[in-house]
Amino acid sequence: MLSPLVEMPVYSRWPLEIVRASGSYLWDRAGRRYLDFYAGHAVAGSGHCHPRVVAAIREQAEKLIFYSSALPCEARERLLRVLGTLTPPGLTRAFFVNSGAEANEQALALARRRTGRSRIVGFEGAFHGRTLATLVLAGSEHYRNLARAGEAGRVLAEHVRCLPWNDPEAARAGIDEQVAAVIVEPVQGLAGARKADGEFLRALREACDAAGAVLIFDEVQSGCLRCGGLSAGVEMGVQPDLLTLAKGIAAGLPLGAVLATTAVCEGLSVGDLGSTFGGAPIPCAAAAANLSALSEEGRGRRALVHGARLARAIAGMPSVVGVDGLGLLLGVRLEVPARPVIRALLSRGVLTGTSADPHVLRLLPPLVIEEAEIELFLQTLEEVLQISGEEQ
């Protein structure tokens, strides 16, 4: 008798099985409801099973499930039109892929092709994906060592320069004529929702212009209206040459995008980029419906309002050192370890997230979160922190 396949033991999973979801809530097999303040790693921006997204997926699945980008596709064209209404001025070209890591890989390839250089600048605390090329850019030794385990990773790592986070002077000194690209998350998600200073981003833009390097904003977690607009960095007043999106773009279906200036794409020919499933009909249909719903409902503006309210309320709670981030991508720094707080919240029916910093609680609720749900979260968090403080 054949043995059943077993998943590789690479995920740390919560002790509950979710069987359905709607809006900002999840339900387990026993019928218990959970308030979702993590949105599946910032994926469920329009909430779970938004009616417009569900309808778009159903309609597209009944017409055309898949054909590659070798043929035109109405769903892809519709997504391009929707993205065009949200994309910052200057970014005029788009390429669709399957994930954030793939989007970042393609952005790096475009930058190297444009400049003819190989050196890439990243930053302490960064996380750009789990492919070999993106792992060597990680801002932590743990992830960089995963890439360096093989010869190819070690060779790639020789072309990477890791600079201090939020240090304008170090950025100006470290970006020179050898650099092909600078890749930065305007809000570092995994590091604990660390928001870049405006001065820091402006220094990157100025240094890239002076050195002839390409500036890439990795907005895989912070984009798609979570921090106000399509790009958190643009919200802070700085324009990139390349912008990468994924997580929140298609409400849970695999899709990523690279948006680029015309200059970066000069000389591109057929076959220079490719992705079998990138831009497939169903994810594109879901993304068009998702982004349209978020935009028309004013969710980007509301994300900034809700995020500011959450930050103000949480800052005054017991054991809270400070709150970082932007919009509905927040990191709550605690005097106590975050994991026991996360477990206590889960036991009370609230799902939140971890970060690479053991003292930071990461919050990424759906952008459709409402006042009553915010109030419920704040009450539950304060109760948990009060108990945690008394136990110290």
Image: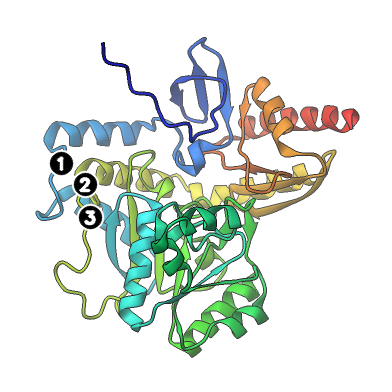
* Residue at position x 39%, y 69% in the image: 242
Q: Please name which of the two marks, 3 or 1, marks the residue nearer to the observer.
A: 3
Q: Which residue is mark 2?
A: 280
Q: Please name which of the two marks, 3 or 2, marks the residue nearer to the observer.
A: 3
Q: Which mark is residue 55?
A: none
Image side of residue 212 versus residue 352, left or right = left
Amino acid found under the numbered disc labelled 2: Ala
Residue 118, picture quadrant: bottom left
Q: Position of residue 315 (x, y in %)?
A: 79, 46
Q: Earlier in the sequence, mark 3 or mark 2?
A: 3
The answer to which of 11 and 201 lies nearer the viewer is 11
* Residue at position x 41%, y 65% in the image: 243
Q: Within 10 Å of the Cα at label 2, are there few (<14), some (14-19), or many (20+) other Cα atoms?
A: many
Image side of residue 74 versus residue 233, left or right = left
Local secondary structure at mark 2:
loop
The answer to which of 125 and 56 lies nearer the viewer is 125
Q: Position of residue 361 (x, y in %)?
A: 68, 42
Residue 326, picture quadrant: bottom right
Q: Are marks 1 and 2 in contact (CB under 8 Å)?
A: yes
Amino acid found under the numbered disc labelled 3: Ser
Q: Which mark is residue 66?
A: 1
Marks 3/2: CA–CA distance: 10 Å
Amino acid found under the numbered disc labelled 1: Phe
* Residue at position x 39%, y 30% in the image: 49
Marks 1/2: CA–CA distance: 6 Å
Q: Is residue 177 above or below residue 197?
A: below
